[in-house]
Image: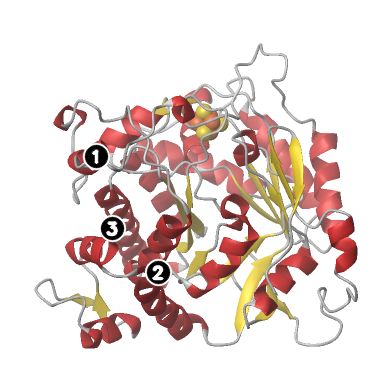
Amino acid sequence: MAIKSAPTANIFDSAVLEDVVCGNLRITPEQALSLYHDMPLPELGRWADQRCRALHGEHLRTYIVDRNINYTNVCTAKCTFCAFRRDGHEDDAYTLTYDALLQKVQEIVDIGGTQILMQGGMNPELPLEWYTELLSQLREKFPQVHVHAFSPPEIIEFVHFFDTPGDTLEEQVRWVLIQLQDAGLQSIPGGGGEIFAPAVREKIGLGKCNAEVWLTVMRVAHELGMNTSATMMFGHIEGIADRIHHFDLVRTWQDKSIADFGLHGGGRYNAFISWPFQPDNSPLGRVKGWDWSESNPFPGDVVAKLDGSGTKSDHPEFGRRLRLAGSSSYLRTQALSRLFLDNIYSIGSSWVTMGPAIGQTALFYGANDLGSVMLEENVVSAAGTTWCLDEAKLCRMIRGAGFIPAKRDNQYGLLEIHNDENSPDKLITDWSIFEKERLISHTQDCATVTLTLND
Ligand code: SF4
């Protein structure tokens, strides 16, 4: 049954928000925009936390042990926010060999990993057989490892690169996904979501698929029974209304997938993760910031419309000014995503970009999941930010926030509940040794700094 909305209700009324928390009332985009701008952050966080507790209970907060493998950095797209991509002829362009890839999987299996998240650039040199052979080898050598791989922009380039049969894009996507699924692909990550609004996407995602195509790939994946995640990268040239338009498309297409495929073994978006743009080393990062003391509104906010219809001609400075997003903007956006996305099970904290302290705080702003341990990461680290945490430290973060850490699988099934003395964090008797060594590494300009976790 569809959740009702009440467009004329006062969304600041506690009784109305209680209904949102219980899942009986759906926030409209207009109400979401009002909440973003006018509700104090602690209050917004409190409502998001209540919604999170209604969905996930009071006790457990989760994480997964997986490995992010970026199999190639060669890419035909030229996203302006990307510091990772290379043209094929550049000295530091790479494509991992099967041996190197399998070695990385072995390393995560050795520490109890259950999944690999594999994404790369859109490399025109790799034929379909390269992917299907890789998936087959992964399935044969690591049948216990869930393969979560190839975001929608990659799938669309596969359609273009592989001379794919089919009369429509949807048929072509279906054909590609079936080949990959038959070879061992199990679910699709939500990379390449960025911001869906066309005016923004056309500026920052040069050569990347548009929102409708992105959403179509996910819909076909759902039809084929694969779960997916959805993502949003914000804090660049967009307006706040663009973020809410992005939420709205995810919620609408999730409704459709559930209605059309839910009773027939279909998949769905099972998680939403958002993070702020990381500016270092990318062309977009060189764009001028915005002087917030000016009384003029930020160009992106002038252009942005809740229905995504804004056009770049609506402001001469659109795309030429960066807004960036700090901790409060991140927490506000994440909290709103929890309240708005009533049909998405999990909201992930982005400690990889925000650092462990805000990542931990995010557990009180609607996030129920800390995502993965991080052995390596090549995409946001190319843009200047890398935080590395192992399982014990993730558990310590969750326990420090007052919850019991639980290791999960890709489908959010619980694998281990760490409520005894054998928990990874409890086995460490002296955390001070990590301060002497390296508790958390944050590399920026090749420097490494040592930080401590919040208790
Ligand atoms: S973000 Fe992805 S698709 Fe865009 S240029 Fe970078 S590697 Fe290519």
Residue depth check, mark 1 versus mark 3: number of the one nearer the observer? 1
Q: Amino acid at mark 3?
A: Asp
Q: Secondary structure at mark 2?
A: helix
Tell me which residue sits at (63%, 73%) in the image.
Answer: 62
Residue depth check, mark 3 versus mark 2: number of the one nearer the observer? 2
Q: Which residue is mark 2?
A: 338
Disc with the residue nearer the chain's start (1 vs 2):
1
Residue 383: quarter of image? top right
Q: Which residue is mark 1?
A: 294
Tell me which residue sits at (37%, 78%) in the image.
Answer: 47
Q: Is mark 2 within 8 Å of ligand 1?
A: no
Report whether residue 430 is seen.
yes
Tell me which residue sits at (81%, 88%) in the image.
Answer: 420
Q: CA distance from mark 3 to mark 2?
A: 12 Å
Q: Residue 128: image x %, image y %?
A: 62, 30
Q: Which residue is mark 3?
A: 248
